[in-house]
Amino acid sequence: MIEISWFFILSLLLIFSFLRFFLISWWDKREETIFPDYNPNVILIIPCKGVDIQMERNLRSFLNEDYDRLKIVAVIDSLDDPSVEIIKKVGMDFIISDSTYKGSGKVKAISTAINQFRERDVYVMADSDTEVPKDWIKFLVNPLLDPSIGVVTTYPIYEPFNNFNFWSMIKKVWGFLGINMMEFRPSRFAWGGSMAIRKDLLSDEDFEYFSSSVSDDAAITRICSKKNLAIYYSKKSTPKVHVDETRSTFVEWATRQMAISISHSRMAFSAGLTLYLSIIVYMFALIPLSILITNYFLLGYIPFLLTMIINARRTDKNKISIFFLSFIMPPIFLYNLINGKMKTHIEWRGTKYKLQK
């Protein structure tokens, strides 16, 4: 009787897992709607500080965008910044950030550009370490025709600069968590490395809040939530971020991501702790349960297998490595989560910021 009960529970688990698999497959094939008559004036804002991997290639990808009504501006802290040489080389316009704003360096840069280009219909923000596809702007801006949408965003594929770098591969798999969150509407957020907003999203009050924030994406997410506006995920705008990680740089990056999320949500830590602890206990409990009670418990690994398959399908490179690394990610997520909870400050590109609770 016990075996039958457990078999019934595991059968339901299997059905749920397969449904999840097919739902995600359906989402992958879903076409994004384009409204050809919507062609707003766009300002593309690219904060630049220091030199990123393949930065010249990244900046040229922005300049090669197939969009007519587009003004591109890089924002720098000073003329002494190492990025200036590359910005000039590719022929991109730039301005100097206004240090009077109270937010992080990146938020100051974005706020400076928004204030200088108030007449533009749409503000697009991008990170200088991203390489974008040719139609990136079109698919990022177009959904804003719908007034119920507050921000259009996407999430990158972290592409290892060196295919055999273990920590770069871990970061690539870690990044699939962000994609999973984007595909699930309740967990969606505005990713600051690639997002577009209409100018009417930022009232004077909202602009003041944004310009004093540490995290641009957390601030925009909160503004949309306050106004009951949707966050639209544009998969066709997915950029690449080339990475070359060491253990220390990966841990610093992943901890910073978790710390920012926790600081802007009361539920983030408790929900994440419950989720990852449950997953880890579940993973380790299946083996003794399959030995002591019934072999059917080994079927409980099927959800992990499906996740591994889904992650491997997301990339054209290193599919086998991605497949196996996906299995070890829950303990890494838990480690990053606990480290993030302990953080009161974060450091980004040489500057330390106090987290806003």
Image: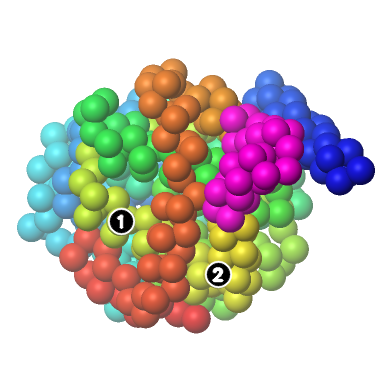
Q: Which residues are magenta?
A: 279-306
203 versus 332 height, above or below: below
User: What is the number of the mark on residue 251?
Assistant: 1
Q: What is the tally of numbered marks visible in this picture? A: 2
Estimate the x, y position of residue 63 in percent, counting from the top left: 33, 31
Determine which of the numbered discs, if any, sits on residue 269 in the image.
2
Above or below residue 88? Residue 148 is below
Q: Residue at x 50, y 25 (%)?
A: 312
Q: What residue is shown at x 65% (from left), y 26% (from top)?
A: 28
The image position of residue 334, as x and y in percent, is 47, 59
Q: Amino acid at mark 2?
A: Phe
Magenta stretch: includes residue 296: yes
Which residue is depicted at the point 15% across and 61% down?
A: 78
Label placed on residue 242: none
Magenta stretch secondary structure, dominant:
helix
What percent of the width, then of the height, locates residue 304?
Answer: 60, 36
Please identify the quarter of the rendering in which residue 52 is found: top left
Which of 67 and 176 lies nearest the eye of the viewer? 176
Indicate the colouring scheme: rainbow
Q: Disc 1 marks which amino acid?
A: Val
